Amino acid sequence: MRFRVFGDRASQGNLMALTERPENPPDSGVPVQVLAGSSDRADWQLRFFYPGSREAPLCGHALLGAVQALDITDGLIETGAGILQVRSDGDIAEVNLGPRQMLETDLSGFSACWLGLMPGNIHLEGVYSAGKAKLCIWVDSLQALNAATFNLPALEEWNQSREFSGYVLYTEHGGQLYARATNPLFNLPEDSACGVCCSALPLRMGAEGSNVMMGFPGYHNRVYLRCSAGDIWVGGRVVPA
């Protein structure tokens, strides 16, 4: 079973699939495959595999796709990142990634040129985590965000000794948030819709929540965020692919 997650339309969003084996062949064409199994601590256990069968503790969009595939309306999921609460209503699924935390991380030596930008274009907000730790980088304009390129070897080398799994660049334009994400440690040059990245962003959310547009260059993917009792919930539309 294949689903697209976070797309405004059925042809958009991040692709995921359920698998019967703990693998994801390099030529599968699916960014993340999910193996679902029984758990003695939750309703299901989920394992996440990137192309080349490299396993990750958690992938937000793949988890939401699995919630729909397994028809979970309200339950608990065991992942490598812990036990997570999930919900679904119609074609919308969401997951509670817990409270956002800032991690003390040495950011010295980072170069804006690894993003194809000038130092004045960016500000390193810091490493934040809700589900998985990400380096959050504010970009001064949508034009600069669109111009960004990722020097994956340099980013991966600098990333190796630090306690976070990827980078998320974000900006505001016309009252709307836009973001791009990369994860060189898992050989993901650009993630078109990453709920875990968006959950890490140091945003102030009111009762109505926020949404972040991803999927450069068109930004057709929408990641919903809300804060409830101090926890960050991430959700989006999930449709069969």
Image (cartoon, rainbow, N blue to C red):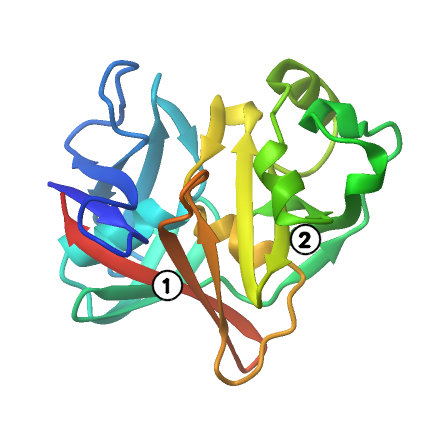
Q: Could you tell me residue 234's position as x and y percent?
A: 43, 63
Q: Name which residue lies at 64% across and 19% down.
A: 151
The C terminus: image quadrant: top left
Residue position marked by numbered label 1 in the rendering:
235
Residue position marked by numbered label 2 in the rendering:
128
Q: Residue furthest toward the right?
A: 108
Q: 18 left or right of 209?
A: left
Q: Residue furthest toward the bottom?
A: 207
Q: Could you tell me residue 104's position as x and y percent?
A: 81, 49
Between discs 1 and 2, the one toward the N terminus:
2
Res 160 visible: no
Q: Amino acid at mark 2?
A: Tyr
Q: Tell me the element at label 1.
A: strand
Which tag is nearer the camera, tag 1 or tag 2? Answer: 1
Q: Could you tell me residue 223's position as x and y percent?
A: 41, 58
Residue 18: quarter of image = top left
Q: Amino acid at mark 1?
A: Gly
The N terminus: image quadrant: top left
Q: Name which residue lies at 32% across and 30% down.
A: 31
Residue 73: quarter of image = bottom left
Q: Residues within 10 Å of mark 1 (few under 14, many from 20)?
A: many
The answer to whether residue 88 is above or below residue 60 is below
How many marks overall?
2
The answer to whether residue 58 is above or below residue 190 is below
C-alpha gap between disc 1 and disc 2: 19 Å
Res 140 visible: yes
Residue 222: quarter of image = bottom left
Q: Tell me the element at label 2.
A: strand
Q: Residues within 10 Å of mark 2 (few under 14, many from 20)?
A: many
Q: Could you tell me residue 109's position as x and y percent?
A: 87, 27
Q: 179 left or right of 48?
A: right
